[in-house]
Structures are given as structure tokens and as C-alpha cells.
Image: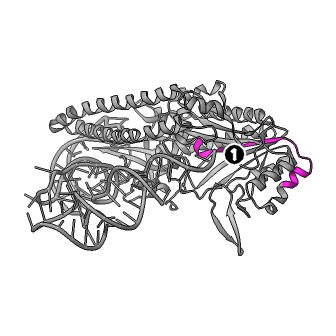
Amino acid sequence: MTTITELKHHAGATVTLNGWVYNLRTGKGIVFLILRDGSGLCQCVIAQDQVDEAVFLAAEGLTQESAVSVTGTVVADERSVGGHELHVTGLTVHQIAVDYPITPKEHGVEFLMENRHLWLRSQRQWAVMRIRNEIIWAIHRFFQGRGFVQMDAPIFTGNAVEGTSTLFETDYFDQKAYLTQSGQLYGEAMAMAHGKIYTFGPTFRAEKSKTRRHLTEFWMIEPEMAFHDLPMNMDVAEDMMRFIVTEVLANRPEELKILGRDLSVLRNITKPFPRITYTEAVERLTSEATDRLLTTMEEERKAEKAALEAELPALEKELGGAKKFRKVQIENRIREIRARFEEIEEDFRNIPVWRKSALEKKWGDDLGGSDETLLTMQYDTPIMVWGYPSAIKAFYMKRDPDNDAIALGVDMLAPEGYGEIIGGGQREESLDLLLERIREHELPEEVFGWYLDLRKYGSVPHSGFGLGLERTVAWICGLKHVRETIPFPRMLGRLHP
RNA sequence: UCCUCGGUAGCUCAAUGGCAGAGCAUGCGGCUGUUAACCGCAGGGUUGCUGGUUCGAGUCCAGCCCGGGGAGCCA
């Protein structure tokens, strides 16, 4: 018994593979079985004159996703996926799958999400999960290698901590409890015990967000470091992101290839990440350059639409007399063009909104999703925006000692419109100032008793940040939506499977 | 909560207010090297739901349900 990834070490040998039928093609006297074993795909060739009659009959009766063990000789063959194929001598059928719903054809999002438990077997989803795993492992290696202690923050919390997000409420033995929106406050306590810690756990937000960047349940990594100021915090965030991307590039090239990821942007990760202040970001958004960028974007979309419109009549004319194979190609292309039209129309509707949001941005306004996209479009690496208006940031964020209007917070924005993947900053270490902020935000002082203790007993400058795992996976994989970055996404209207 | 697009066969999609169709999948037959194989035949429909307009509604109108994208909010 071996696995498909190991086949290259067994050329000429007889091996047994255990797995599932990914696809099946039959000809007279020959069956091509694409086997999926979790480690990869391998074509198994069953020739009638090479096997017992019973084996050949069994092979002909296989269906997509039936479970089998296949024995045969490993043969190098360039025609095959992965460069090696199996010339079969024996076959054991464990179970015949009837009417597997996900056929080797395109499907819609709704159907695939209903069948998420099966969709995970498809090659692209398989590749995403392998990269997600690589990212998780890289994060642990990064922090463990630098003396951080992993800690688990509670998932039930007794209060709506920051008073900003909408939280899921549960009944905790007749008390109200909320599902955590962040482990940060608990992380700060552990950082005062261990110096450097990180949490790695689920986070819940009851926001009714219906976008490609939002889940109601997602995984967040939150390092917290004693004796670290904001620049040191940014150094850690940048080093961590560079480490993650470098490891994925080195260890998961096959998976990135399956996804068709453009690697050039990922390779830019070796460059330093630009650090710009919120004030500079606002200046840039309201600048002539942003206006021109939007005009260019609009013109590009118009040109693209015109080109596609010009392509359509020729395709439709050819369709009538086309042979079947070409017909399918043309129909696919027409579908592609129509889908793209819808995206372009949506951009046309959005561009004026984006323009208004960016050009009319005033110091003190928060940056929206489109603003982040317009900013990151001007760079080819992640960027860090820091020094936000203190009025729009959480009560615990430390303010610039020289300018009370500015909070020492930082967001890391991924390129290509993926938006915020990290949010963090330096924490207020002064007891008096923290009390003042709690009162300003009209938060219940009594529930912060333990948190305030951290400022009474050995308070030091400290910082940390939260990394959104799914957004990071989406960016590195080049996916349009975070729902494909987690095995079973939880989002508005989606609780099953 | 608001804006916007959509819901037709198991799946992906067609159908000027006028006989509901194609490809894939499934079943049967054919083909010895296929790459979403191909060729032939067959079965497969409460056009999301409710009501309305009309000689006639998948198509028009109203309300509701479900889904995609976006705003707000955020990782």
C-alpha cells in the first residue's frame, strides 16, 4: 500500500492504492479510472486482455466516487496526470456510489454550498484546504520559533467587550453569555504572565454582512506582546506575513498551480511593506491620482465591454453550424461573457459610489472596503496603514502622546482588493487613561475589573494584532470569496451542512 | 436594515405574451490511449410560492420566500 504522491519513488514496482473514483472513461476493452486518494490524482488503466474477466467487469461497473483498492504496476507516462499511471492487475470494490451529485461540470454556488460536504473532495477545494493547513502550520512555526506561548482564550464571554460589534447571545445557566468576538483582552493577561503569547481560535460576529469578505464564524490569530510598541508590533506583523507566504510558495507549489494563482504578487512578499499613516491615506484617496485611477478603471471596463460585445455576434453566427465539440466551447465562452457583463455592470454602478467615498473622505471618517481597494491598487505588496483617528477606534487603544486625536492602531491591507487581513495596535497601559476611556465609551466599568488589574500590577507598554485566517487564505489562494477558505463556512443564511 | 441582480429537468443554461428546449448527468447500445473523451437511442418538468391582468403567462403586475453581489460593520 502506498499513496499517489509517493508513486514517483516506485516506478516499475507493483503497489496498491486505496481511494475513490474521481472520473471514469471507458472504451472497448479498456477502462481509464482517475483515482483520488487524498494525496493526489492518478490515472489507472485497466486493459481487458491484462486482467481477469471479473476484474474488468467490476471496473466497467464503477461510478464516480465509488470506493476502491487498486493494485498494479507503476509506469511513468507523460500523458497521465502527475506523470505516472498504474497498469492495473487487481481491483477491490469497497462500495459503489450511486448518482454522485457533483459531476465533472460547472455548478452554481448555491448547489455547491448545499453539497459542501462532498464539494471538499473536488480538486480546487482540496488544494485550498491543503494551503489553509500550510498557513496554519506556518503561523505556529513562526510564533513557536520566536518564543511565543500559544494560549486558548474563552469562547463564552460575559459581556459585549468592545461595545461595537453585534454578538451572538446564548443562555449560560440563566445568565446572558456571548460568543467571543476577540481573545485580545485575555491575551493581554497572558502576555503579562509569559511575555509573548498568541491565541488561535474561532471568533463570532453576528453582523448581517453579506459580502465576499465576511463570515459569522471565522478563525483569528491574535499575538500579544509585552514591552512592544507600535513599530515593533508592525515589524512582527510584517515578518509573520512574509514567513507565511514564503512557506506556502516553497511547500505548496502544486496546489497553487491547481488554483491557477498568479504567483508574481505573492513573490513580491520579499519587498518591504509600505507603512503609511491614516492621514496620508486620506490625502491619497482625495487626490487627483485616485480620481484618475477611477476614470481609468471606468474606461477599461467600457473598452472591455465593447470588445466582448464585438465578439458575441461572430460566436452566435458560428454556433449554428458548429460541430458538437466546438459548440460546447462557444456556449461556455458566451456564458463567460455574460457573467463578465454582469460584473462590469456592477462596477459601473459601484464606481460613482467609490469615487464619492474616496474623494469626499474627510479626516476622521473610517476607511471603507472600496477605499482600501483603491489604496492597495497603488501598491504590489501588502501595506500597513497606521495612526487612525482615536474617535473611531476601541477604548483600549493607546493614543499618540503628542496628539490625542490619533490612536496607535494599524491595519494591514492585502493587495488585489482583498482588504484588511490584520487589525491591531498598541494598548493603553495607563490605568487612569483607560478608566477615562471606559467612561467616555459609556462601558460598564465593573466588568473590566480584572482587565484594569493588569494596569495596576506591573503595567507595561504592550501591543498585539489580530490576523484573519480566512481572508489570508483567500488572498494567498486568489479566491473570490472567503466561503471557500474554511471547510464548513458559517455565514448569513448558512448553517448547514 | 437598505440598494442591486437572479430563481425553468438531478446540474449548467436557452426560450418576441403563442406547442417548455439544449448540453452534461442517468439507462441501453457502439468505439483499444481517453484527458470535462466521443457517437447513437431513451427516460426525465407543479418554470420558487400566492394572487392578479389576458383569448392565452416561464415571460407582464403585486406581495411573499430563497440565493448572488454591494453599503453599513469588520478580520
Is A464 part of what is drawn in magenta?
Answer: yes
Image point (84%, 45%), residue name: A429
- The answer for which chain carries disc 1 is A
- Picture quadrant where residue B58 is located: bottom left
Say if A311 sits above or below A169 in the image: above
Q: In this image, B20 relative to A183: left or right?
A: left
- Number of numbered markers: 1
In the image, residue A205 sits, relative to residue A367, either above or below, namely: below
Q: What x and y, as percent, mark residue A167?
A: 64, 60
Q: Is residue A440 above or below residue A411?
A: below
- Disc 1 residue crowd, few under 14, some 14–19, many 20+, Cα 10 Å: some
Percent x, y for residue B5? 34, 50
- Asked if the magenta segment contains residue A424, the reply would be no
In-front residue for pair A110/A115: A110
Image colouring? one colour
Residue closest to the eye, A45 or A361: A361
The answer to whether A117 appears left or right of A471 in the picture is: left
Residue bounds of the magenta highlight:
A452-472
Q: Which amino acid, by three-letter code, is at mark 1?
A: Ala
Furthest-bottom residue in this view: A174
Q: Residue at x 25, y 30 (%)?
A: A310
Label 1: which secondary element: helix
Residue A101 falls in image quadrant: bottom left
The residue closer to the viewer here, A413 or A322, is A413
Residue A89 picture location, percent across and down: 43, 44
Is A26 positioned to the left or the right of A244 in the image? left
Instruction: Answer yes or no: is residue A210 visible.
Output: yes
User: Please, which residue is most extreme toward the right here?
Assistant: A457
Residue A55 visible in the picture: no
Q: Position of residue A233 (x, y in %)?
A: 75, 36
Q: Which residue is mark 1?
A: A391
Q: Quadrant of residue A349?
A: top left
